[in-house]
Image (cartoon, grey):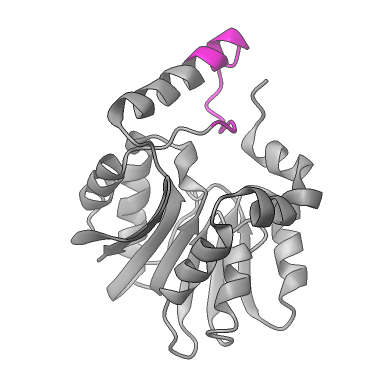
Amino acid sequence: MLEKMDAFFEKRLDGYDEHMRTNVDDEGQFYAFTAAQLPKAAGAKILDLGCGTGLELEEYFPLNPTAEITGIDLCRPMLEALEKKFPGKKLRLICASYFDEPIEKEYFDAAVSVESLHHFTKQQKIPLYKKLCNGLKKGGYFILTDYFADHQEREDYFQRELIRLKKEQGIEDNAFYHYDTPLTVANETDALLQGGFSGVEILNQWGSTYTLKAIK
């Protein structure tokens, strides 16, 4: 049965960090690699989309202990767990959908998202990326580490399956439900470019997980 996104993660909070560390291929590499791409300047302002319990921040704060983090996530208990991990750090945590939450114009030095955006369609992402691009300072960038479909047919299959499951279960609302619908890297890149980013490059790859850098 499909579960609403916030409820799905709240139910799995107790074992979430351990699951991500032990059951997700190459997690130990891609969280550290992602963190290493973020600004090291003192007081850097970073926006974290779908921050969860802050696994990427565990790798980032040792590199930049004075960074100012704005984290947006649907699951309040995960945000509470994140806050407990980092006493004394500059955190602004927002329990909301990053699709709905306004982003300050030209405020952030960089943005990051790890294993969150593969739940959404290209059509949903383009306006989000426009808002995100506007929120970055000149020269700012977005680091996206996520799971991608290996070809178009696979992407289309995931999209059809979500529609089928919602219909089968009588779900008619527009809430977010936990089901993976990853795009291909090509379609993700196009969504970022349509969102206003000037260029996108692949920084690294671990199987189906890639790190992309989108430059304002």
- Would residue 16 be found to the left or right of residue 121 on screen? right
Residue 102 in the image: x percent, y percent?
A: 45, 56
Q: Nearer the viewer, residue 56 or 27?
A: 27
Picture quadrant where residue 124 is located? top left
Residue at the spot 40% in from the left edge and 21% down from the top edge: 157
Residue at the spot 45% in from the left edge and 50% down from the top edge: 146
Q: Nearer the viewer, residue 65 or 107?
A: 65
Q: Is residue 125 placed above or below 28 in the rendered structure?
A: above
Tell whether position 111 is magenta: no
Residue 74 in the image: x percent, y percent?
A: 62, 47
Quarter in which the C terminus is drawn: bottom left
- Would residue 142 be found to the left or right of residue 46 on screen? left
- Would residue 68 be found to the left or right of residue 18 on screen? left
Q: Is residue 50 placed above or below 152 in the rendered structure?
A: below
Q: Is residue 94 placed above or below 38 in the rendered structure?
A: above
Residue 27 in the image: x percent, y percent?
A: 57, 58
Quarter in which the N terminus is drawn: top right
Picture quadrant where residue 167 is located? top right
Residue at the spot 27% in from the left edge and 40% down from the top edge: 187
Picture quadrant where residue 71 is located? bottom right
Residue at the spot 59% in from the left edge and 71% down from the top edge: 57
| Main SS of residues in magenta | loop
Tell whether position 171 is magenta: yes
Q: Which residues are magenta?
A: 164-179
